[in-house]
Amino acid sequence: MTQSRPGDQRPGPFWAAARAHALSAATLHGLAVFPLSRSKLPAIATAHPESSATCTGQCGGPGHGVHDATADPARVRELFAAAPWAAGYGIACGTAPHHLFGLDLDRKNSVDGVAALSALAAGHGFEVPRTVMVATQSGGWHLWLRAPGGAKIPNTAGLLAPGIDTRGWGGYLVGPGSLGPKGRYRFARTFRQCAIAEAPTAIIDLLTTRQATVQGSPGLVGPGRALGRSGGRLEPLVWFVLDCGPNDLNNRLYWAARKAFESDGIAPDTATAELLAAAVRCGHPEIPARRTIASAAKGAARTRMEAAS
């Protein structure tokens, strides 16, 4: 559940703890944070629900997801005042001073990202660094790393290996202390035990090489996964999503889906499946991506009705 106006309701039962954890992350560690709902989505409704404009906060108001993130305690309090149903907080990746880069290691659906990272390290000759680590609600881990030289590392899903997602520039990690749909996120290794380690060069090189392959190989978004199978009018829209920058993924997804649903030559189910796969591959969380596509479908339906009237 999301809220966009402060004072509409009393704070929910998890709000005070979420705000306290977020303020601690901002004041003690300089991390840029923003409120999340229990579904791990931004707790403030989007500022531009019907627009495809690429506003990342220039309008001055909240409701821009990760772009609302701040380490200023006063601003953090303002954001949480506008999000009475917050149950956690997100930590923006890629921003100074930490230039945080996260490895999200899943352990679910017969996939073990922790084992996959160990195998990747053994196969490519690097050590998994000792760093700050968060235990996720589903039994996985978030490894916090620093992007070398402040590099803008991409958000990816399964590109390094099955069960390993990356959270980089324009992405976010769920902060420890947050409550998700299946439980609470907790520190497994804290700042008192170690600092945030720099990401191994081998991981950055692998990401760079595989991302280039994804963007340069028609119809491919990663090992064994094809996109654009329908060809024709849909394929350019899929590639429009895949070729996004770090700040315009959702807007591109909405625009492409709107064009697809307004076209007579593209099956809606096919458009949904392929555009969703492209967005997730670029780092868009699946649930909000589905909502964006659904919103585009409603917009396209209105356009058709207006044209027919």
Image: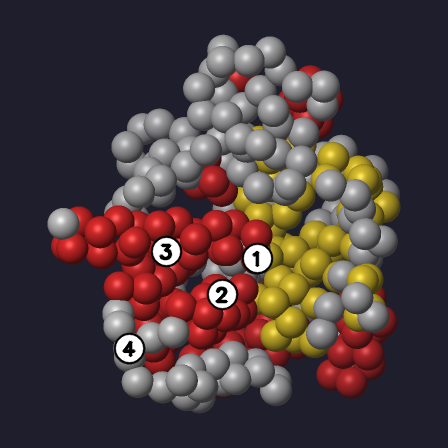
In this view of the protein, can residue 82 be seen by the observer? yes
Where in the figure is residue 105, as x and y percent of width and height? 75, 61
Amino acid marked by disc 3:
Ala
Amino acid marked by disc 1:
Glu
Mark carried by residue 297:
3
Q: Is residue 118 above or below residue 104?
A: below
Which is nearer the eye, 74 or 242? 242
Question: Circle 2 is placed at which residue position?
Answer: 276
Give the SS element for disc 2: helix
Residue at 26% from the left image edge and 49% from the top image edge: 302
Question: Circle 4 is placed at which residue position?
Answer: 265
Where in the figure is residue 274, as x and y percent of width and height? 47, 73
Residue at 43% from the left image edge and 53% from the top image edge: 294
**In the displayed structure, does residue 244 sit left or right of residue 138?**
left
Q: Is residue 52 above or below residue 153?
A: above
Amino acid marked by disc 2:
Leu
Question: Mark 2 vs mark 4: which is more N-terminal?
Answer: 4
Q: Quadrant of residue 59?
A: top left
Marks 2 and 4, how far apart at CA? 18 Å
Local crowd size for mark 4, using a 10 Å CA cut-off: few (<14), some (14–19), many (≥20): few
Marks 2 and 1, how far apart at CA? 7 Å
